[in-house]
Image (cartoon, rainbow, N blue to C red):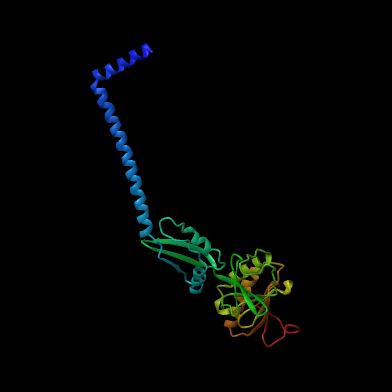
Amino acid sequence: MTRQTHQGGNDVSEARRSPALAEWRRQCRRRRCARVATVLSLSVGVGLALGAGESLLALRELRVVSTDRTLAMEVAQNLTLPSHPNLLTTPIVQFTREAERCPRVAKAEVERRLPDRLILTVHPRTPLIALERNGKYLLIDKDGMCLYWCQRPRKELLRVTGWHPQRAQVGQRLTDEWFERSRDIAQALLQWTKLQPWRMDASNPPELTLTSGSGAKGTVGVDGDTVKRAELFAEVLQELEARGNQVGRVELRTRRPIWWPASQRVAGGPDHPA
């Protein structure tokens, strides 16, 4: 105890003899208090700023735009808005995800328009094939996505009959061999606009037949390069019709195409090397 008392006395004496040390300690305490006050002030300021920002940036308009007006309306009706949405804290990527759940949407993009708007742009899928079933057509794009049913498909679409995939329902994706064959033929025939609309009958694969808008039939089969035969049929048919011929049928599975006029039957009729 004596030693401790003696040391304490030495400390007090040292502090009295060192006013500079005491002043330094007071300055340290003041700096610590100043730092704490600054942190508290910043916290309050940030909180007020966030509150004001949420109020100023409250979402007041979510506009859906598309080259397909009916698609924009469909997407807009199915969007879910969170409570009190704003451009500062609401995860806007959720709107693109919801839009892309629609089978007709290929891609969706969202853009902030300060202070209070979001613009959601939806890009539609482009139909390529019209699959006939019971007098109606299921439209399918190049990725095999089944889009929607219609009564009268557009002229440029390949109308397919005789092919009945089990998964041919809106929102499903087709990946089988017949889809790939139909897609490749449809893409090959897109350029032959004067011969549209094209039809493909797949009910008898060895006799796979294409029909032009004029009613001319071309037998391309499936035992060779069907796509090249389809392109050859279009080329031969356009040339023959440009010469004034009314073509009834063209056989493409032979070494050279053989055609018959529309007024003659294939069986027993004379053939015409094209």
Q: Is residue 16 above or below residue 50?
A: above
Q: What is the total number of numbered labels drawn onto the structure image?
A: 0
Residue lying at the far bottom of the rendered structure: 263
Q: Quadrant of residue 263?
A: bottom right
Q: Is residue 265 above or below residue 56?
A: below
Is 268 in front, or is 209? 209
Q: Is residue 221 left or right of residue 242?
A: right
- In the image, residue 64 lies at what x, y percent? 46, 68
Q: Which residue shows up at 64% across the image and 72% down it? A: 230
Q: Is residue 5 left or right of residue 110?
A: left
Q: Is residue 25 left or right of residue 197?
A: left
Quadrant placement of the C terminus = bottom right
- In the image, residue 209 lies at what x, y percent? 68, 75
Residue lying at the far front of the rendered structure: 1
- In the image, residue 57 lies at what x, y percent? 37, 59
Quadrant placement of the N terminus = top left
Q: Is residue 121 above or below residue 21?
A: below
Q: Quadrant of residue 101?
A: bottom right
Q: Is residue 164 left or right of residue 40?
A: right
Residue lying at the far right of the rendered structure: 268
Q: Which residue shows up at 31% across the image and 40% down it? A: 37
